[in-house]
Amino acid sequence: MGLLDILGLGSKSESIKDFVTKGAVIIDVRTIGEFREGHIKGSKNIPLDTISGKVNEIKKLDKPVIVCCRSGMRSAQAASILKSAGIDVINGGGWQSLESKL
């Protein structure tokens, strides 16, 4: 397992396609202001600093989750939090890069 795998960035394209096929929900963990400036259509905005308190709400969606942010660092943190809560999650990295893979 390499550094990219630890950060949730390893072999991302294939996994993202798999998650999309499974009906994944995209959660953007940037601030509300950043989200308003641009985001992936249909994505949900749950800022990183609030995600721990939204775990049960996310579990109720009963879908795999792709998290994204500006560069991939905050979404890596969010993926770790959600994964430790038993949620099927992948770090999609930066939202613009992710959008180009969808």
Image: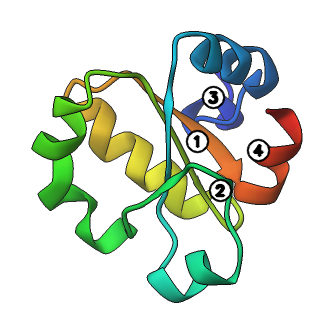
Tell me the crowding category of disc 1: few under 14, some 14 to 19, or many 20 or more residues within 10 angstroms, Cα based.
Answer: some
Q: Which residue is mark 4?
A: 98
Q: Kindly give the residue lying farthest to the front in the view shown.
A: 42
Going by the numbered disc 3, the residue's amino acid type is Asp
State left or right for residue 77 relative to residue 54: right
* Residue 91: % across, % down: 57, 39
Q: State the CA–CA distance, disc 1 to disc 4.
A: 15 Å
The residue beneath circle 2 is: 72
Mark 4 closeness class: few <14, some 14–19, many ≥20 residues within 10 Å:
many
Disc nearer the start of the sequence (3/2):
3
> Which image quadrant: the C terminus?
top right
Q: Earlier in the sequence, mark 4 or mark 2?
A: 2
The residue under label 1 is: 7
Which three-letter amino acid code belongs to the residue tagged 1? Leu
Q: Residue 61: horizontal and vertical position, in percent?
A: 26, 31
Of tags 1 and 2, the one toward the viewer is 2
Q: Mark 3–mark 1 contact, CB under 8 Å?
A: yes
Q: Which residue is mark 3?
A: 5
Instruction: From the viewer's perspective, tell me whether residue 12 is left or right of residue 29.
Output: right
- Residue at mark 3 to residue at mark 2: CA–CA distance: 13 Å
Q: Residue at x 81, y 57 (%)?
A: 96
**Depth order, front residue of 57/88:** 57
Q: Find residue 7 and report its horizontal and vertical position in percent.
A: 58, 41
Q: Amino acid at mark 2?
A: Gly
